Image (cartoon, rainbow, N blue to C red):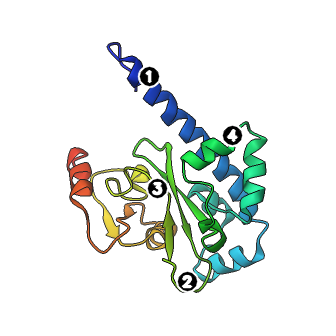
Amino acid sequence: VIFHKSTPNDYEKYNIEQRKAYILETLFQWASISLFESKKALDYLSKRGFNDKEYLVRMGLGLISSLHEMINAMAQYGITNEELKILGLISKKWETHPLIGLWRNRAGQPWTMWGRCLGSVPEGEEKYYLLPGEGTKSTPYLLHQVKGNELVIVEGFLDALVLNLFGENRAVAIVGVYITQDQLKTLGRLHIK
C-alpha cells in the first residue's frame, strides 16, 4: 500500500512487488493448464484424493512440465528471462519438482511458489523446492484463506491441502517440523490463536 508520505523508494518497491505478483500469477495460470495435460501429475494427485479440478485451480496447484516451455510461454506475456532469473524461476529444480503450488500473502496476492517431486524423491534432493526469497518462514502457507482467529497447524503443503479439501478451512502449513518465531509474530499481529 502506498501512503501520502511515501518516498520514491517506497514507490519503486511497490512496483517491483506488483510486477512479481503479476509474473507469479501469470506463471500459475499457465502451469494450471499444464497440470491438466499431464496424466502422471493427475494420477499422482488422484492417489492423494485430489480429483476435483476446480479445487486444484482454487488452491493454486500447477505443473511446470518443461522449463523451456515455461520460459517461452512467459515471453508471450512480456515477461523477460532476466525477470524470471531474478525471481529464481529459471531453475533445473523444476525438472525434479514439477508440481507447483502458489503461495499467497495474507492479502491473497501471489508471493512465492513451491515445487514438489512427483512420486519418490531423487537421491540427493529434498521433497520440496522453495523459491529463494523472503517471507516464506514468516507466514504459514494458506494463511490467506483462513477466516476467523483459530488455526489447524500442520507441517507440509499437501497436509494443509488435504485438510482443506475435506472442509477444514483453518488448515495452514508451517513448512517445517516446528513453528518459527517469525510465524508466531505474524499470527500474534493478526490475533490468531
Secondary structure of residue under mark 2:
loop
Label 2 vs label 4: CA separation? Answer: 31 Å
Secondary structure of residue under mark 1:
helix
Give 69 or 171, whichever is nearer the viewer: 69
The residue at which mark 3 appears reads as 132
Secondary structure of residue under mark 3:
loop
Q: Amino acid at mark 1?
A: Tyr
Q: Residue at x 36, y 72 (%)?
A: 155
The residue at which mark 4 appears reads as 79
The residue at which mark 2 appears reads as 121
- Whether residue 192 is visible, yes or no, is no
Q: Earlier in the sequence, mark 3 or mark 2?
A: 2
Q: What mark, if any, has residue 11 been given in the picture?
A: 1
**The N terminus lies in which quarter of the figure?**
top left
Q: Earlier in the sequence, mark 4 or mark 3?
A: 4
Left or right? Give the position of 188 relative to 142.
left
Instruction: Mark 3 and mark 2 in contact? Answer it, CB < 8 Å.
Output: no
Give 152 or 134, whichever is nearer the viewer: 134
Q: Residue at x 74, y 64 (%)?
A: 66
**The C terminus lies in which quarter of the figure?**
bottom left
Disc 2 residue crowd, few under 14, some 14–19, many 20+, Cα 10 Å: some
Disc 1 residue crowd, few under 14, some 14–19, many 20+, Cα 10 Å: some
Residue 23: where, in percent of width, then height?
61, 42
